[in-house]
Image (cartoon, rainbow, N blue to C red):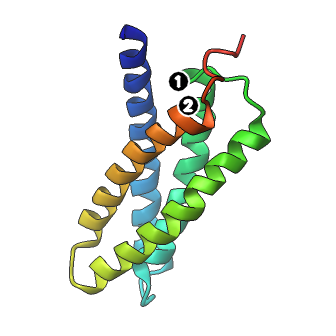
Amino acid sequence: TKESLWQSLKFLLFSISAGVIQIVSFTLLSLFVFKDSENLFGWSHLIALLLSVIWNFTFNRRYTFKSAANVPIAMLKLFGFYAVFTPLSTWLGHLADMAGVNEYIVLIVTMLSNFVLEFLFSKFVMYKNQENTRI
């Protein structure tokens, strides 16, 4: 439907802005904070991901899904999603990084996977039956 398409577009735009935050913070952390770390991808990825998740959650809850869902419960659901996604993506990203794959290719693949999976999780789990409830 037209509403679902518009919702997908808004999620995409907010995710792009969160992606910019993630890439910039990942780059700054990689260049200046964890530059000598053996786990460069891991620490930079985790912190950058956290910053982008907070940004994305805030805007998508309010503007994309227009949900009045209980914030702590919605955040707990999102925490559950990231309790699975983050260790898995960090481990796979670390393996790819150690295999010589460019860290930015790893980051982009991780971000694209995150985008698709988080949209589906938000729509069908986190805000199921709670969309368009915000006045």
Spot occupied by residue 69 in the image (x, y as percentages of width and height): 73, 28
Q: Amino acid at mark 1?
A: Thr
Res 132 → quadrant: top right
Locate residue 47 relative to residue 13 in the image: left or right.
right
- Crowd rating for badge 1 (residues with CA inside 10 Å; few <14, some 14–19, many 20+): many
Discs 1, 2 touching: Cβ within 8 Å: yes
Q: Nearer the viewer, residue 16 or 76?
A: 76
**Label 2 sits on residue:** 60
Q: Is residue 109 above or below residue 125?
A: below
- Quadrant of the rendering where the N terminus is positioned: top left
Q: Secondary structure at mark 1?
A: helix
Residue 53's tag is: none
Q: Amino acid at mark 2?
A: Asn
Spot occupied by residue 122 in the image (x, y as percentages of width and height): 54, 37
**Label 1 sits on residue:** 64
Res 104 → quadrant: bottom left
The residue at 59%/63% (across/down) is 83
Q: Is residue 94 above or below residue 49?
A: below
Q: Secondary structure at mark 2?
A: helix
Locate residue 21 relative to residue 127 in the image: left or right.
left
- Crowd rating for badge 2 (residues with CA inside 10 Å; few <14, some 14–19, many 20+): many
The residue at 39%/64% (across/down) is 27
Distance from the alpha carbon under mark 1 to that under mark 2? 5 Å
The residue at 42%/77% (across/down) is 91
- Quadrant of the rendering where the C terminus is positioned: top right
